[in-house]
Amino acid sequence: MKEYKLVQPKLGFRNRFQNFEDLLNQYAREGWRVIEIHQGWTAVLFERDKNR
């Protein structure tokens, strides 16, 4: 079974790319993988196995 998480990143204006990369890496360490990145980085949809 899968579980999903929708995140609306707060990236700011400075270091926007680095902040986005850090956010993705943080969730990857927790076992999440990116399913979709909405246009303009307004939201990121993650997925992982619920019974890990």
Image: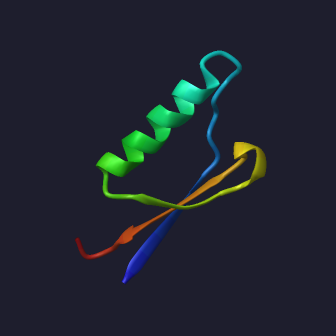
Q: Is 13 left or right of 24, judged from the image as shown?
A: right
**Residue 19 position by quadrant:** top right
Relative height, residue 31 to residue 1 (above, below): above
Residue 29 versus residue 11 in the image, above or below:
below
Residue placed furthest toward the right: 40
Q: Nearer the viewer, residue 20 or 50?
A: 20
Residue at the (55%, 35%) spot, across then down: 20
Asked if residue 17 lies left or right of residue 25, the reply is right
- Residue positioned 25% across, 76% down in the render: 51
Q: Position of residue 35 (x, y in %)?
A: 54, 65
Q: In this view, which residue lies farthest toward the bottom?
A: 1
- Where is residue 8 shown, x and y percent of the image? 64, 46
43 sits to left or right of 1? right
Q: Residue at x 71, y 55 (%)?
A: 38
Q: Is residue 38 left or right of residue 5?
A: right
**Quarter of the figure with the C terminus:** bottom left
Q: Quadrant of the N terminus?
A: bottom left
Q: Residue furthest top?
A: 14
* Number of numbered discs visible in the structure rendering: 0
